[in-house]
């Protein structure tokens, strides 16, 4: 199992499983430092889904769609959502990742979402 903590796993009404990554600001370092860490975690979440770790933890998730959602709080506006959009585009066009998804039985498809909010 990858050394990654999934902050939350939930389900959508359509049956898709959602792995939530929570990013809490404000950031004390340059945005690039934090964005690189988020990107690494996103890759780990993809691996968790494709390699069957999610299905081992949640047996009924096998063969279902998976959504990887980033919930960002008090981060610079647009930084996290921009990263998630670029990451999703890359995953969608990567032959290596598409082949990995198509060659296994643990996940049917992977999609991405992002929410940026300020805490009161």
Image (tube, rainbow, N blue to C red):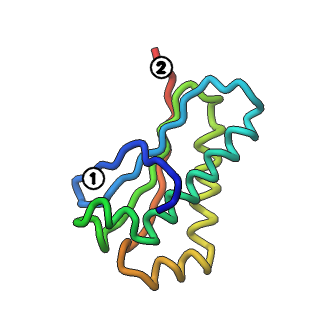
Q: How many marks?
A: 2
Percent position of residue 23, x then y: 54, 35
Percent position of residue 8, x then y: 37, 44
Q: CA distance from mark 1 to mark 2?
A: 24 Å
Other-residue count near label 2 (Cα within 10 Å), few / some / many at <14 / 14–19 / ≥20: few
> Which residue is most to the top?
120
Residue 32 image-quadrant placement: top right
Please tell me which residue is depicted at 40% across the width and 51% down the height of the picture. Answer: 19
- 1 to the left or right of 58: right
Q: Secondary structure at mark 2?
A: loop
Please tell me which residue is depicted at 55% across the width and 58% down the height of the picture. Answer: 44
Please, is residue 9 above or below residue 61 in the view?
above
- 112 to the left or right of 33: left
Please tell me which residue is depicted at 27% across the width and 52% down the height of the picture. Answer: 11
Residue beneath disc 1: 12
Q: Secondary structure at mark 1?
A: loop
Indicate which disc residue 119 carries.
Answer: 2
Residue 55 image-quadrant placement: bottom left
């Amino acid at each position: 199992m990858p050394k990654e903590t999934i902050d939350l796993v939930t389900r959508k009404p359509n049956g898709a499983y959602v792995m939530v990554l929570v990013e809490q600001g404000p950031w004390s370092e340059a945005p690039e430092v934090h964005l690189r860490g988020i990107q690494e975690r996103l890759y780990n979440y993809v691996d968790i889904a494709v390699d069957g770790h999610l299905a081992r933890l949640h047996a009924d998730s096998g063969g279902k769609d998976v959504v990887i959602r980033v919930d960002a709080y008090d981060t610079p506006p647009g930084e996290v959502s921009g990263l998630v959009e670029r990451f999703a585009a890359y995953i969608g066009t990567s032959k290596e990742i598409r082949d990995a998804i198509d060659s296994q039985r643990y996940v049917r498809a992977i999609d991405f979402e992002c929410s940026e909010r300020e805490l009161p």
